[in-house]
Amino acid sequence: MNNAAGQILAPTHKMSSRAIDAVLGIVLHGSAYCTVAAGRRWIDAGERNKVVMSILTVSALLGAPFTVPSAMAKAGVLAMTKSLAVEWGPRGIRTCAVVPGLFPTEGAWSRLVPKERGGDEELVKTIPLRRVSEHIELANLAAFLVSDGGLHQRRRRGDRWRQDAIGRRRCQHAVDARLDRRGMGGDPAEQEVSLVTFGGRASNF
Protein backbone atom coordinates (compact mmCIF):
# COMPACT_ATOMS: atom_id res chain seq x y z
CA MET A 1 0.00 0.00 0.00
CA ASN A 2 1.51 3.29 -1.15
CA ASN A 3 -0.23 5.92 0.95
CA ALA A 4 2.64 8.22 1.85
CA ALA A 5 1.91 11.90 1.35
CA GLY A 6 3.77 15.13 1.85
CA GLN A 7 3.04 18.70 0.86
CA ILE A 8 4.44 22.15 1.41
CA LEU A 9 1.66 24.58 0.69
CA ALA A 10 3.47 27.49 -0.93
CA PRO A 11 3.77 29.41 -4.24
CA THR A 12 5.78 27.15 -6.51
CA HIS A 13 8.20 29.86 -7.66
CA LYS A 14 9.22 30.47 -4.05
CA MET A 15 10.02 26.85 -3.23
CA SER A 16 13.65 25.84 -2.83
CA SER A 17 15.11 22.73 -4.44
CA ARG A 18 15.38 21.13 -0.99
CA ALA A 19 11.69 21.72 -0.34
CA ILE A 20 10.76 20.12 -3.65
CA ASP A 21 13.09 17.19 -3.03
CA ALA A 22 11.58 16.67 0.41
CA VAL A 23 8.13 16.11 -1.07
CA LEU A 24 9.38 13.99 -3.98
CA GLY A 25 11.44 11.90 -1.59
CA ILE A 26 8.43 11.02 0.54
CA VAL A 27 5.76 10.58 -2.09
CA LEU A 28 7.52 9.41 -5.27
CA HIS A 29 10.82 7.87 -4.18
CA GLY A 30 9.35 6.24 -1.09
CA SER A 31 6.53 4.65 -3.09
CA ALA A 32 8.95 3.45 -5.77
CA TYR A 33 11.45 2.01 -3.32
CA CYS A 34 8.82 0.11 -1.33
CA THR A 35 7.06 -1.18 -4.44
CA VAL A 36 10.26 -2.40 -6.07
CA ALA A 37 11.40 -4.06 -2.83
CA ALA A 38 8.09 -5.90 -2.48
CA GLY A 39 8.05 -6.87 -6.16
CA ARG A 40 11.62 -8.18 -6.00
CA ARG A 41 10.78 -10.36 -3.01
CA TRP A 42 7.61 -11.75 -4.61
CA ILE A 43 9.20 -12.41 -8.00
CA ASP A 44 12.34 -14.03 -6.56
CA ALA A 45 10.16 -16.32 -4.45
CA GLY A 46 7.84 -17.13 -7.36
CA GLU A 47 4.84 -15.83 -5.42
CA ARG A 48 1.69 -14.83 -7.32
CA ASN A 49 -1.69 -13.27 -6.55
CA LYS A 50 -0.11 -10.16 -5.06
CA VAL A 51 -1.44 -6.59 -5.22
CA VAL A 52 0.17 -3.17 -5.06
CA MET A 53 -2.30 -0.42 -4.23
CA SER A 54 -1.48 3.28 -4.44
CA ILE A 55 -3.47 6.25 -3.18
CA LEU A 56 -3.18 9.23 -5.55
CA THR A 57 -4.47 12.79 -5.47
CA VAL A 58 -6.88 14.80 -7.57
CA SER A 59 -4.16 17.35 -8.33
CA ALA A 60 -2.15 14.67 -10.12
CA LEU A 61 -4.97 14.38 -12.67
CA LEU A 62 -6.52 17.82 -12.85
CA GLY A 63 -3.90 20.21 -11.53
CA ALA A 64 -4.19 22.55 -8.57
CA PRO A 65 -2.29 25.63 -7.40
CA PHE A 66 0.44 25.45 -4.76
CA THR A 67 0.62 21.63 -4.91
CA VAL A 68 3.12 21.12 -7.74
CA PRO A 69 5.66 18.84 -5.98
CA SER A 70 2.93 16.61 -4.59
CA ALA A 71 1.08 16.52 -7.92
CA MET A 72 4.33 15.67 -9.74
CA ALA A 73 5.08 12.88 -7.30
CA LYS A 74 1.61 11.34 -7.38
CA ALA A 75 1.58 11.54 -11.19
CA GLY A 76 4.82 9.58 -11.10
CA VAL A 77 3.20 6.97 -8.87
CA LEU A 78 0.36 6.73 -11.38
CA ALA A 79 2.87 6.15 -14.20
CA MET A 80 4.54 3.46 -12.09
CA THR A 81 1.17 1.82 -11.49
CA LYS A 82 0.38 1.66 -15.20
CA SER A 83 3.83 0.45 -16.23
CA LEU A 84 4.06 -2.26 -13.59
CA ALA A 85 0.60 -3.51 -14.54
CA VAL A 86 2.11 -4.49 -17.88
CA GLU A 87 5.49 -5.65 -16.59
CA TRP A 88 4.39 -7.58 -13.51
CA GLY A 89 0.93 -8.71 -14.62
CA PRO A 90 2.20 -11.93 -16.22
CA ARG A 91 3.87 -12.77 -12.92
CA GLY A 92 0.57 -12.58 -11.05
CA ILE A 93 1.14 -9.14 -9.50
CA ARG A 94 -1.67 -6.63 -9.92
CA THR A 95 -1.47 -2.88 -9.48
CA CYS A 96 -4.35 -0.56 -8.68
CA ALA A 97 -4.80 3.05 -7.65
CA VAL A 98 -7.51 5.15 -6.03
CA VAL A 99 -7.90 8.90 -6.45
CA PRO A 100 -9.85 10.05 -3.40
CA GLY A 101 -11.82 13.24 -3.31
CA LEU A 102 -12.13 15.19 -0.06
CA PHE A 103 -11.50 13.07 3.02
CA PRO A 104 -11.01 15.48 5.93
CA THR A 105 -8.61 14.55 8.69
CA GLU A 106 -7.69 16.79 11.58
CA GLY A 107 -4.00 16.89 10.70
CA ALA A 108 -4.33 17.50 6.96
CA TRP A 109 -7.31 19.84 7.15
CA SER A 110 -5.77 22.11 9.74
CA ARG A 111 -2.81 22.67 7.41
CA LEU A 112 -4.37 22.63 3.96
CA VAL A 113 -7.78 24.24 4.50
CA PRO A 114 -7.67 26.02 7.87
CA LYS A 115 -10.63 28.08 9.04
CA GLU A 116 -8.56 31.23 8.51
CA ARG A 117 -8.62 30.48 4.77
CA GLY A 118 -12.36 29.88 4.71
CA GLY A 119 -12.41 26.20 5.53
CA ASP A 120 -13.80 23.66 3.12
CA GLU A 121 -17.14 25.29 2.30
CA GLU A 122 -16.10 26.39 -1.20
CA LEU A 123 -14.51 23.04 -1.93
CA VAL A 124 -17.64 21.17 -0.93
CA LYS A 125 -19.64 23.24 -3.44
CA THR A 126 -17.59 21.65 -6.26
CA ILE A 127 -18.79 18.16 -5.29
CA PRO A 128 -22.06 16.98 -6.92
CA LEU A 129 -23.27 15.38 -3.67
CA ARG A 130 -22.31 18.51 -1.72
CA ARG A 131 -20.56 16.55 0.98
CA VAL A 132 -17.11 15.23 1.78
CA SER A 133 -16.49 11.50 1.79
CA GLU A 134 -16.51 9.16 4.76
CA HIS A 135 -13.37 7.20 5.51
CA ILE A 136 -15.28 3.92 5.56
CA GLU A 137 -16.23 4.54 1.93
CA LEU A 138 -12.59 4.71 0.91
CA ALA A 139 -11.72 1.70 3.06
CA ASN A 140 -14.47 -0.39 1.46
CA LEU A 141 -13.34 0.56 -2.05
CA ALA A 142 -9.71 -0.25 -1.28
CA ALA A 143 -10.68 -3.59 0.26
CA PHE A 144 -12.68 -4.48 -2.85
CA LEU A 145 -9.88 -3.61 -5.27
CA VAL A 146 -7.29 -5.75 -3.50
CA SER A 147 -9.72 -8.65 -3.14
CA ASP A 148 -10.32 -11.39 -5.69
CA GLY A 149 -13.49 -9.54 -6.65
CA GLY A 150 -11.40 -6.65 -7.97
CA LEU A 151 -9.22 -8.78 -10.25
CA HIS A 152 -10.23 -7.29 -13.57
CA GLN A 153 -11.58 -3.86 -12.72
CA ARG A 154 -10.28 -1.14 -14.99
CA ARG A 155 -10.97 2.45 -15.93
CA ARG A 156 -11.87 3.39 -19.48
CA ARG A 157 -13.19 6.53 -21.06
CA GLY A 158 -15.45 5.81 -24.02
CA ASP A 159 -13.71 8.16 -26.44
CA ARG A 160 -10.37 6.55 -25.61
CA TRP A 161 -11.42 2.89 -25.75
CA ARG A 162 -10.36 2.21 -29.33
CA GLN A 163 -7.09 4.12 -29.02
CA ASP A 164 -6.23 2.45 -25.72
CA ALA A 165 -7.18 -0.98 -27.03
CA ILE A 166 -4.97 -0.64 -30.11
CA GLY A 167 -2.07 0.59 -28.01
CA ARG A 168 -2.55 -2.23 -25.52
CA ARG A 169 -2.59 -4.86 -28.29
CA ARG A 170 0.64 -3.56 -29.75
CA CYS A 171 2.28 -3.44 -26.35
CA GLN A 172 0.87 -6.85 -25.46
CA HIS A 173 2.34 -8.45 -28.59
CA ALA A 174 5.78 -7.08 -27.70
CA VAL A 175 5.46 -8.21 -24.09
CA ASP A 176 4.22 -11.66 -25.10
CA ALA A 177 7.13 -12.09 -27.48
CA ARG A 178 9.67 -11.20 -24.80
CA LEU A 179 7.98 -13.42 -22.22
CA ASP A 180 7.79 -16.36 -24.62
CA ARG A 181 11.50 -16.06 -25.31
CA ARG A 182 12.15 -16.15 -21.58
CA GLY A 183 9.77 -19.04 -20.97
CA MET A 184 7.29 -16.97 -18.99
CA GLY A 185 3.61 -17.09 -19.76
CA GLY A 186 0.87 -14.81 -18.58
CA ASP A 187 -2.77 -13.98 -18.93
CA PRO A 188 -3.11 -10.58 -20.68
CA ALA A 189 -6.17 -9.90 -18.55
CA GLU A 190 -3.95 -9.92 -15.48
CA GLN A 191 -2.10 -6.90 -16.84
CA GLU A 192 -5.02 -4.53 -16.45
CA VAL A 193 -4.48 -1.64 -14.10
CA SER A 194 -7.31 -0.48 -11.88
CA LEU A 195 -7.63 3.28 -11.61
CA VAL A 196 -10.67 4.36 -9.67
CA THR A 197 -11.52 8.01 -9.20
CA PHE A 198 -13.59 8.43 -6.08
CA GLY A 199 -15.47 11.43 -4.82
CA GLY A 200 -14.79 15.11 -5.44
CA ARG A 201 -14.10 16.63 -8.83
CA ALA A 202 -12.20 13.54 -9.92
CA SER A 203 -15.49 11.64 -10.13
CA ASN A 204 -15.91 13.07 -13.63
CA PHE A 205 -12.51 11.90 -14.88
Image: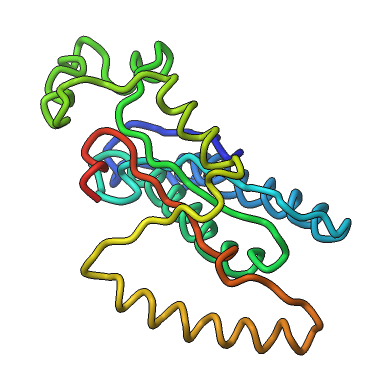
Task: Write the residue at 21% across / 39% down.
Answer: 201
Task: Write the residue at 37% across / 47% down.
Answer: 71
Task: Write the residue at 33% across / 37% down.
Answer: 198
* Front position in the image: 134 or 78: 134
191 sits left or right of 40 in the view: left
Q: Quadrant of the N terminus?
A: top right
Occupied quadrant, residue 127: top left
Tell me: residue 39, above or below residue 126. Answer: below
Colouring used for the render: rainbow
Residue 180, horizontal then vertical, whole percent: 74, 86
158 sits left or right of 51 in the view: left
Work out which residue is located at the far front of the displayed protein and give it: 149
Q: How many numbered tags mark residues here?
A: 0
Residue 46, horizontal then vertical, whole percent: 85, 59
Tell me: residue 41, above or below residue 163. Answer: above
Residue 162, horizontal then vertical, whole percent: 30, 77
27 sits left or right of 120 in the view: right
Task: Write the residue at 48% across / 60% down.
Answer: 79
Residue 91, horizontal then vertical, whole percent: 72, 64
34 sits left or right of 155 in the view: right
* Front position in the image: 12 or 98: 98
